[in-house]
Image (cartoon, rainbow, N blue to C red):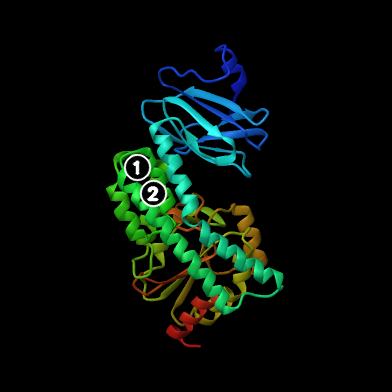
Amino acid sequence: MKKTVYAAVICLSLWMPGCRTEVREFCLRAEGLSVQGEIWAYDMAGDEAPDTIRVHEGGFVYRREVGQEPQLWMLTDGATMMCYVIAERGSLHLAGDTGLVTGTALNDRLARLLRLYREVGADLEEEKSALLELVDAHDQELTPEQAQALEDLSREQAQREEHLLRSFYAEDKTTILGALELILLQGLVSDEEFASLYAEGSETVRRFPPILRFWERSAAREQATVGSDYVDIRGVHPSDTTQSLCLSDFVGKGTYVLLDFWASWCAPCRGAMPDLKRLDATYRDRGLKVIGIVVSDTREDHLLAANALGVTWTQIFDSSNVSVAQYAIEAIPLLLLLDPNGRILMRTHDKEEVIEKIRQLLGD
């Protein structure tokens, strides 16, 4: 349940319009905001329900008790406003729509980082915008040269951002600010580079829940990549939940196995069924076993969809969605082709790729 903070009332009780901090309390004063109504303050560690802050005449005063260790929070209205703040003892200030909070050493450094982060690729962003405006003005498609130019600009921008974040992380990797920097680096570095940066961080950084979740997904991806051995999946038969099914019942038996992770509500998943049906009919007696892994679905919806789509091949119903974590699944349908020994040969979202691979292995 959200907690509503009536900031103005709290500060009036102090007989002053500003903030007077006490032990284990912080106070954030904002002014000149364009957003109106409500915003929410989220503990990014996910330990607490969000606070609701009411903005009045472009400002608010938000105060609360904090623990001994600084916490990373985010303020947002769910649309146009997003502001990071480190909740620690002290008096903090948010000026207008800058999204920059100042007032303590950690928040001052965070504000400096965010200011530089916005500036580091501003010229490249302008070049990209100008190029896209030119294309729109002539109502035409991007030429190959223009597409390459956009790709080059984006690559250079990412390299600048990575360099900046790495330089800050080198100094902040023992603080909660280092956790935010590592979060921002996730999309800019490879899994191997992320692992190295993660190992450099202090316990504060490594155990920060969003970082820990990404690390666990990264480890799962490494275990479920091409060349790795399959990970067993345990589920039940969709038509009879008393009948347990395991992927290991079918893998390593001398045939290729095609896994299709899908759900009844997923339109691309349903769109792939005619091709999977043809694969099953063509190759079931030639060394291929097709198996559906049902995730993020209800048994009733699955059975209705399977009947409507003519799905007759084996289905393992994963009611707990454990396989989503085991195979680091971020989108469905996901197709995995296993060799006769259970090693992953292919991992793709493209049915045409897997169809072509099977033709190469087993013939037309």
Horizontally, residue 201 falls left or right of residue 5, namely left
In this view, the residue in front, 148 or 193, is 148
Q: Where does the image place residue 356, in percent across and percent down from the top left?
A: 50, 82
Q: In the rendered image, which quarter is residue 360 located in?
A: bottom left
In this view, the residue in front, 154 or 182, is 154
Badge number at residue 182:
2
Q: Amino acid at mark 1?
A: Val
Query: Is 80 placed above or below 155 here?
Result: above
In this view, the residue in front, 245 or 187, is 187
Q: Where does the image place residue 217, in percent across and percent down from the top left?
A: 40, 54
Label 1: element kind: helix
Say which quadrant the N terminus sits in. top right
Q: CA distance from mark 1 to mark 2?
A: 8 Å
Marks 2 and 1: in contact by CB < 8 Å? yes
Identify the residue under disc 1: 205
**Residue pictured at 39% horizontal, 53% vertical:** 164
